[in-house]
Image (cartoon, grey):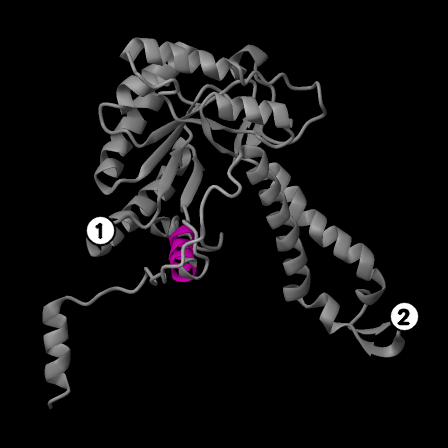
């Protein structure tokens, strides 16, 4: 979002949209597919979601594809019927533009983006096969491009081993239940999402992937990794960060090369990138895509329509 000082309600999605355009401008230099996804939109944040969809529609009308690849609605605080109904309403707008919808049913513990479930009844941390099927039944009538974040004891944030009981094997039960209901030839007919992946063991992650998880959230671990990169840099350069001038090398030696934000932010970014790479390895996605050699194109330049080109040409004659 834009700065908190901006009170215009139509500006709710401006920061997200600006970031999406930035990513499209630079993605061509990396040679790999880039997915632009927005996460955790609670009911109170639907104006943000609406703003992004408006940007998707505008981009789609110009380029034949949406600005974002996917969006997530987190209406898990609402009753199941309302949750599913709102998801269907938005999915009908998204499907024609081929935008993926991620939704959450059941409750993920902890606190995330203003949704606090820290004191929730532990029994409610496990989504039932019937709940998952009710989502599949409703959304599959609209289109196939959706995934379900089903709770299996997940908790947002990090925790000591033994404090949370993850049961990724329950995800297989969801798959088997829906498979039987729809008579699917697929062993895993549902695309599932694992929320609260931070602090999970390799075995828990592997079991989740085996049972149909195609995306995992690791927000807390990546936040720590970002801070940890900065923390280590500060510890190493502490004597160079106490003033603009003066360090162990001399009282008149400048310290700009240490306190320059471009230096320490880079250290934080490098640390977070390494943590993301670690998760990619655990999820089994390393070396699954051959880097493209086809030149990319910048996808944020608006093409003028023919009549505008004619008018522009005429102006050069007078």
**Image side of residue 51 versus residue 252, left or right:** left
In this rendering, the count of numbered labels is 2
Q: Quadrant of residue 120?
A: top right
Q: Measuring from the top left, give residue 225's x and y in whole percent.
A: 66, 45
The front one of 33 and 130 is: 33
Q: CA distance from mark 1 to mark 2?
A: 59 Å
State the residue in front, 278 or 135.
Answer: 278
User: Which residue shows up at 36% across the image and 37% down it?
Assistant: 46
Residue 30's disc number: none
- Element on which disc 1 rests: loop
**Which of the 4 quarters of the picture holds residue 246?**
bottom right
Query: Residue 30: x percent and y percent?
Result: 46, 58
**Residue to which mark 1 is pinned:** 64
The answer to which of marks 1 and 2 sits earlier in the sequence is 1
Q: Is residue 318 above or below residue 51?
A: below
Q: Position of residue 281 (x, y in %)?
A: 58, 38
Residue 198 in which image quadrant: top right
| Up/down of 283 relative to 295, above or below | above
Residue 18 x/y as whole percent: 40, 57
Give, as a single range, the part of the protein colored magenta. 14-26
Q: Can residue 179 be seen?
A: yes
Left or right: 247, with 63 as reference point: right
Residue at x 32% of width, y 20% of height: 136
Q: Kindly identify which residue carries mark 2.
A: 248
Secondary structure that dominates the magenta span:
helix
| Classed neighbour count for the residue bearing mark 1: other residues with Cα under 10 Å, few (<14), some (14–19), many (≥20) | few
The residue furthest bottom is 318
Magenta highlight on residue 31: no
């Amino acid at each position: 979002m834009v700065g908190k000082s901006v009170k215009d309600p139509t500006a709710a999605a401006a920061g997200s949209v600006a970031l999406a355009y930035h990513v499209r401008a630079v993605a061509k230099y990396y040679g790999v597919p880039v997915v632009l996804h927005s996460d955790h939109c609670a009911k109170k944040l639907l104006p943000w979601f609406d703003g992004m969809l408006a940007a998707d529609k505008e981009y789609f009308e110009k380029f034949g594809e949406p600005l974002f690849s996917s969006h997530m609605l987190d209406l898990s605080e609402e009753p199941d019927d309302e949750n599913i109904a709102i998801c269907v309403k938005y999915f009908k707008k998204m499907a024609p533009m081929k935008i993926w919808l991620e939704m959450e049913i059941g409750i993920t513990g902890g606190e995330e983006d203003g949704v606090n479930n820290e004191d929730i009844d532990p029994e409610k941390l496990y989504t039932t096969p019937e709940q998952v099927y009710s989502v599949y039944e409703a959304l599959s009538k609209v289109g196939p491009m959706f995934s379900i974040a089903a709770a299996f004891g997940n908790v947002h944030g990090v925790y000591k081993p033994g404090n949370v009981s993850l049961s990724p094997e329950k995800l297989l039960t969801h798959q088997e239940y829906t498979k039987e209901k729809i008579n699917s030839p697929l062993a895993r007919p549902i695309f599932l999402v694992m929320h609260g992946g931070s602090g999970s063991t390799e075995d828990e992650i592997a079991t989740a992937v085996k049972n149909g998880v195609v995306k995992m959230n690791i927000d807390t671990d990546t936040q720590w990794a970002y801070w940890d990169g900065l923390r280590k840099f500060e510890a190493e350069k502490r004597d160079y960060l106490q003033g603009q001038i003066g360090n162990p090398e001399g009282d008149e030696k400048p310290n700009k090369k240490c306190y320059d934000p471009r230096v320490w932010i880079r250290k934080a970014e490098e640390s977070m990138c390494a943590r993301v790479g670690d998760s990619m390895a655990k999820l089994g996605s390393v070396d699954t895509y051959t880097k493209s050699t086809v030149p990319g194109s910048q996808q944020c330049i608006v093409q003028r329509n023919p009549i505008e080109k004619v008018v522009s040409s005429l102006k050069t004659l007078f």
